[in-house]
Image: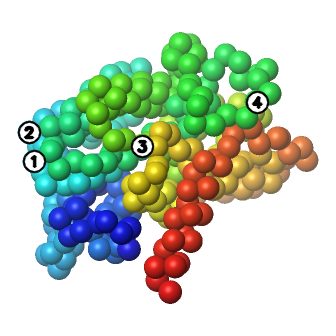
């Protein structure tokens, strides 16, 4: 249920790109909560699957969206009061490398510029990553806990070829600069490693996993949790700035072994080596800001449904 003050005309939102796990989950959760949803997808297969759903649900409209085609972006957003933006790499450049940052920055710029030109747009929820928070030269010596105020260092990311972190940092900074310049109401969700069904060891978020683990900043997030977080910060009129989003910290050998076993290819029949390391690394990253707003969100929804 949307908060008081929402009306039927203000319950139309766009999810872009709806092709990925998070985008698809957001589409279905928003429909369940009574929104009219514009699902903007890049890939033909995803377009067809959403079209089938749209045939039986008049609250879903499906759009082809090219993040480098300004017209297709504005068409998908037309009449919407909100945008949930989740970048999915284009099919012709699906890997994170030194060139992905330029692609992701251009896409973010196009989308935010389109938001500025959409007169019905009230709020944007921009999906970023914890990799835009945790990487800097002081990571080995810093004793403070990382939170939304921290940013990854661009030169550090380039030096160690942390291309996912570089892309997310530059794209988010570009989005914030344009949002402030154009007066766009925007919040960001900086998610941990998404525990998707097809997660593999090649996921770009896992670059530097050993260092994240030892630093106490290796965090993961379940799909349902991060989808709920997006809707929470969208519906809460007091939400602002960035929100670190995770619901598990990988900081013990037990957790690390469990994740490693999950990431191993199913064809690998050799037994997983168990670590004898019993240390638990101190957690050095905080999601307190998000937890506080989500707790209030859940309490308000319970009151509304009772």
Mark 4 or mark 2: name the one nearer the start of the chain: 2
Q: Relative to residue 117, is residue 86 depicted above or below?
A: below
User: Is residue 144 visible to us here?
Assistant: yes
Dot 4 or dot 1, earlier in sequence? 1
The label shown at residue 144 is 4
Q: In front: mark 3 or mark 2?
A: 3
The secondary structure type at the circle numbered 2 is helix
Sequence-wise first label, 3 or 2: 2
Q: Nearer the viewer, mark 1 or mark 3?
A: 3
In the image, 51 versus 4, the foreground residue is: 4
- In the picture, the disc for residue 71 is 2
Q: Which residue is at a point 49% across and 57% down the rendered structure image?
A: 229
The residue singled out by tag 1 in the image is 75
Label 3 to label 2: alpha-carbon separation: 24 Å
Q: In which quarter of the image is residue 62?
A: bottom left
Mark 3 vs mark 4, CA separation in Å: 24 Å
Helix, strand or loop at label 3? It is strand
The residue positioned 61% from the left and 56% from the top of the image is 292
Quadrant of the rendered structure where residue 113 is?
A: top left
Q: Count neighbours of disc 4 (C-alpha within 10 A) and say few if under 14, some if 14 to 19, many if 20 or more.
A: few
Which residue occupies 15% across, 43% down?
118
Residues under labels 4 and 1: Cα distance? 45 Å
The residue tagged 3 is 187
């Amino acid at each position: 249920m949307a908060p008081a003050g929402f009306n039927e005309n203000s319950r139309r939102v766009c999810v872009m790109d709806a092709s990925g796990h998070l985008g698809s989950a957001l589409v279905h959760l928003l429909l369940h909560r009574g929104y009219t949803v514009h699902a903007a997808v890049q890939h033909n297969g995803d377009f067809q699957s959403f079209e089938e759903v749209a045939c039986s649900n008049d609250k879903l409209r499906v759009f082809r969206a090219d993040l480098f085609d300004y017209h297709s972006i504005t068409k998908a957003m037309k009449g919407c009061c909100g945008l949930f933006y989740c970048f999915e790499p284009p099919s012709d450049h699906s890997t994170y490398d030194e060139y992905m940052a330029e692609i992701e920055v251009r896409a973010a710029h196009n989308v935010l510029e389109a938001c500025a030109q959409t007169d019905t747009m009230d709020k944007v929820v921009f999906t970023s990553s914890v990799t835009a928070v945790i990487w800097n030269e002081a990571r080995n010596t810093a004793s403070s806990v990382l939170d939304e105020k921290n940013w990854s260092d661009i030169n550090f990311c380039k030096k160690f070829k942390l291309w996912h972190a570089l892309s997310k940092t530059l794209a988010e900074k570009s989005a914030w600069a344009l949002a402030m310049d154009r007066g766009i109401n925007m919040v960001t969700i900086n998610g941990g490693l998404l525990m998707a069904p097809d997660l593999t060891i090649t996921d770009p978020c896992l670059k530097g996993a050993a260092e994240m683990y030892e630093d106490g900043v290796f965090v993961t997030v379940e799909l349902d949790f991060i989808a709920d977080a997006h809707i929470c910060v969208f519906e809460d009129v007091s939400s602002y700035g960035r929100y670190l989003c995770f619901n598990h910290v990988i900081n013990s050998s037990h957790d690390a072994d469990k994740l490693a076993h999950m990431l191993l290819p199913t064809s690998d029949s050799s037994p997983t080596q168990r670590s004898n390391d019993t240390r638990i690394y101190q957690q050095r990253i905080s999601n307190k800001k998000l937890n506080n707003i989500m707790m209030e969100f859940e309490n308000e929804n319970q009151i509304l449904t009772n």
